[in-house]
Amino acid sequence: MRRITSAINTASAEFKTRAACNRARVAEFREMQRAARDDRPERDIRRLEKHGKMRPRERLELLLDPGTPFLELSSLAANTEYDGESPGASIITGLGIVSGREVIIHADDSSVKGGAWYPLSVKKIVRCLDIALENHLPVIHLCDSAGGFLPLQNQVFADRYMAGRIFRNQCLLSKAGIKQLALVFGQCTAGGAYVPGLSDYNVIVRGTGAVFLGGPPLVKAATGEEVTAEELGGAEMHTSVSGTCDYPAETEEEAIAIGREIVQQWEKPKKWECQRDDPVPPHYDPQDLYGILPDDIKKGFDMREVIARIVDGSRFHEYQPDYGTTLVCGFANIWGWKVGVLGNNGVLFNDSALKGAHFIELCNQNNTPLVFLQNITGYMIGREYERDGITKDGAKMIMAMTCSHVPKFTVMCNGSFGAGNYGMCGRAFDGRFMFAWPNSQIGVMGGEQAANTLADVKAAQMKRNGEEVDDTVLEELRETTGRAYMEQLSAYYATSHLWDDGIIDPVDTRNALGMAITSALNAPLGTPGYGVLRL
Amino acid sequence: MGHDTPPFKRILIANRGEIACRVIDTCRRLGVETVAVHHLSERDARFVRLADTSAEITGDTPVAAYLDADQIIATARETGAEAIHPGYGFLSENSNFARAVEAAGLVFIGPAPDTIDLMGDKIRSRQFAEKNGVPVAPSVTGGEDIDAFVEKAASIGFPLLIKASAGGGGKGMSIVEGQQDLLTRARTARSEAERYFGDPTIYAERYIERPRHIEVQVLGDGTGKVLHLYERECSVQRRFQKIIEEAPAGHLDPALRDEICAAAVRLSEAVYYRNAGTVEFILAPDGTFYFLEMNTRLQVEHPVTEMVTGLDLVALQLDIAAGRGLSLDQSEITLTGHALECRVCAEVPEQDFMPATGRILHLDPPAGDNIRFENGLREGTDVTLDFDSMLAKLVVAAADRPAAIDAAKQALERTVLLGVETNLNYLARILSHPAFRDDPLHTGFVAEHEAALAEPDLSPHEAARVLMAAALTFREFRTLAFDAPEPYASIGGWRN
Amino acid sequence: MKLKLRLNGTPHEMDIAALKPDLELRIDGRSHALRETGGIGALRRARIDGEDIAYHQARSGNRAFLHLGGRNWIVEFVDPRDAAREKVQGSGDIRAPMPGVVVSVEKQPGDPVTAGDTILTIESMKLQTNLTAERDGVLAEILKSEGDVFEKGAIVARLQEEEDSDA
């Protein structure tokens, strides 16, 4: 491995323009994140205070080991939905360290609508538990939710990946020996009752915590019985009579302290031995990324410059440097862990697809995790390329990537269009974690192409119907279809729908990948093997 | 002095802790074998280990075991001890014990039993002192004839303390500053005495403001020969117990010193005193002094006297008890330098000197030619409420009083005694107080300077320093600080 | 999470902001650097805010005894679980301020008490102390009887829990 020699001139006008643009993007992202985390109606805050409850993030900080990181996932989930009434989808998830052990945390955000679960809340919890299953990460549930958001129950309840999936995942986690702890700070009603019910350990706070299938109003309606929440499913009853809960706590602080003590009893998992060196920070300043990433998605950049600002010591062993040059492949270390990096430097041609497939096979042979840095407009199209078998070469890359038994990680660095998204380990391909940069876009095709295509289709339709199509009408069509399409291309739209595990500031990429890779190594490697490669 | 053979072959020490260790120390030097007695709870104590042999004694409480005269005498006979050293406290001033020891054919290392009886009786000892020209605080008792009482009381001089003869607890007690208040106060006191105690007898004595506690170390061989080893001052007290003692007293006129020492010798000669003993006086700011009591045993604070006279009081006790008399003459006893003793106690000065319990986890006493750290401690020793809260005595000598104060302060600061709350910091604060150095002491010193002696507020910097050092000792902190897994520890408290 | 410590009875909060290369601590809001530099047995060395410090230490349960800078210190680690319980039950518990023995019991369980009422009298080093109710209430239980001995901090009696008074 050798240090990448950067060709970036940080004093250039281009660098400065790009930096200004990207810093503004990140500032916008940070502000959205701050608002999603902190801005709450006064009334909700007062209600929490009245019940002597902490805000969910206060609980989180008390739970986590001091001086250790927390990688929050999907902090802007649901940001484009429900008129913004479910910031972060009313759920906080993330990777953290509790009593020296890596855990994934699911915390209900009771500071918004009593922590009610919206459809995307459910999706976020399910994703959290999927991560736990895939990476063998213990789960800590911080329960404080009013239950499913009733007006949208048709999108919450019935289908395969809706609420039931949470409990299905809980069962499979326990079966796999992956521990779960639930700390019950508020009410866990109906389905929500199964979160502590299906956890291996649980703690309930006296006075505010309650677990029941039907709350007092439902009981009254059903049987006429009048009963308080505390009598029906409070700490005293569940820890001394029903045995549904394990430990009563006098305060939220105590519940967290008990929780930390419980986690301390857990065996420390053995990670599979990925090759590791002592970590060193990148030689080049990650802040340079702002000036490297373009201010316009159509402008290019050398992915090696990005790699140089993420990997240890900016050191990189490039594979086949002179072949299939639109796909940069090579070995590097991230926070010490040896990884194979694939980054786009242009459209994927036959040779770059073949190089990618081969490199993925090398990494599997070598038990080296894969990191995909996406900036892809797609596989090359056109008569010549089809004749050369671009589809079957792309298929080889997709087959090799899909069937990899090593963990995969993806960062959406800029564009992600067409089948290139697949070959570079898009969301559908079960990468362990996927992060997006605020500038990134994702779609079947780029915005301008889509606008043109849509306008062309519309114009053709109008012509068939004998309507007059002039340029102004066409322009207007392009404009309206384009705007709607562009909104959906945005990283914010993607992250809102949990198409990734969250937008991150580019300079945080090294830490995010470092934590993601470290966590992923808890799960044993899968079985090596591929399907039929079309040769 | 100068005997070739040990005074005894073997003695039993009917005590424990630092004083047992102290006695053993001299015995070892003299070639006297020692038998310690211990309660089961102290079977691993330092004095048990230092003694040649130790026998277990039993009792309902550990203290009860040490008060069981019969058991201790039986143990002495069983172990072949010729004599018993009682130390201080426990049976040391129990005449029945002394008689029983003698009746058992053993030697009691102490005075004649009758002397113990005489000096142990407040009224008789006072009368005896008065008869032998030792000043006692003037007092008058009466009240039936109020005018006669007032007349006699006025002759004592003011201020006066009037109290009910039968009383206590401050009821019917008052301080009278001058003649003009005397009659009214006496009447009030009499009616209160009648009302509270059913006995109108009242009592007036000279009220001494800012009294000093001065005591004289004496040695007598029982033939009437008595030497004094000069005085000690023990005015710094808390809860009526001494915490800092010194020899000689500071700010004391030499002529007055001679007068006080002579009075002590006079009293001791009159009883044909045998053994080391201490005659305690109250000294008023005007130079008048009054007999308080005589302690017929080795005193806790005896080492300060040893430091300034160069004598070994325990060795002298043994010689006297063995009938070897006193080969010393008064002219051979000279004072050199100044010595201070600080009583290191397991207590919380900030909470009214409430006793503290714990276990000695680490002990690293200060060392030096002029430092004695008298103690019965080992690492692992439990500090309980079974016995007195005194853990050790730090005794320091230097050329003069200011130097001794500085040396004692330094020695206190070098004393590492971990595992129980102690008054070490408090003692150092007393020694640092200008009034301790510059002014005559008095028994109200601790109360007078309460605010100045309180634990000073810590600067945030100082507090943080201590907290960080302390944090390193806690497993909980260490786990968090040093056991965090990598790469998380290196990533640190990052948030995305 | 934050650590709670008590120095000479005064509570302090300690947060670990960073673990490497040196520990970065925040104590009562101020930032400090700490590195352990060695030591044998009770004698330890640390670099605290750039200054090399040697000190003696020993620990007994939640209490650390230190000899640092010529003075003795006792620092108590406040167990978060104990602290949480104290916070809630607080004044309802009557705790022994010092070790000792019960001399007399003045009240019976079920008795109504007013703040300041003596519940029992204890003796410690020949000094008798009255243990009193910190608030009005009803005596729930007395855990020690005459002649019983106890350690400092032991709960000797307990008041019934207060009724929730929120409107």
Image: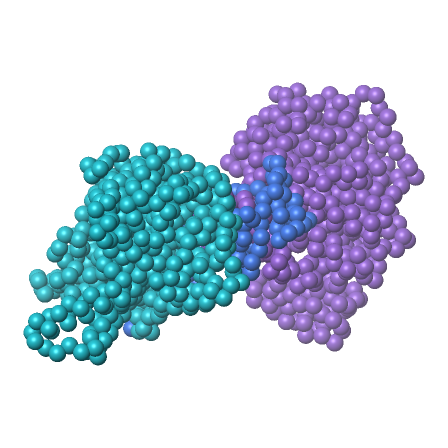
Chain seen in purple: B
Residue A494 percent location from the top left of the image: 27, 61
Give above or below for B467 relative to A531.
below
Q: Is residue B168 left or right of residue A217?
A: right
Question: Looking at the rendering, in which quadrant would you find the C terminus of chain A?
Answer: top left
Give above or below for A476 relative to A296.
below
**Residue at the location (62% across, 58% down)?**
B461
Residue A441 percent location from the top left of the image: 30, 61
**Residue at the location (45% across, 53% down)?**
A305
**Visible in this render: residue A325?**
yes
**Residue at the location (66% across, 63% down)?**
B451
Q: Give the colour chain A carries in the figure.
A: cyan
Q: Front-most of B99 and A6? A: A6
Q: Front-most of A402 and C80? A: A402
**Residue at the location (86% across, 26% down)?**
B2
The mark tally for this picture is 0
Q: Give the colour chain C carries in the figure.
A: blue
Looking at this rendering, what residue extends furthest in the front direction?
Answer: A384
| Quarter-of-image position of residue C42 | top right
Q: Front-most of C107 and A257? A: A257
**Visible in this render: residue A255?**
no
Give above or below for A127 relative to B143.
above
Residue B129 percent location from the top left of the image: 79, 49
Residue B229 percent location from the top left of the image: 84, 42
| Quarter-of-image position of residue A268 | top left
Q: Is residue B90 left or right of residue B373?
A: left
Give above or below for A322 relative to B238.
above
Q: Front-most of B65 and B146? A: B65
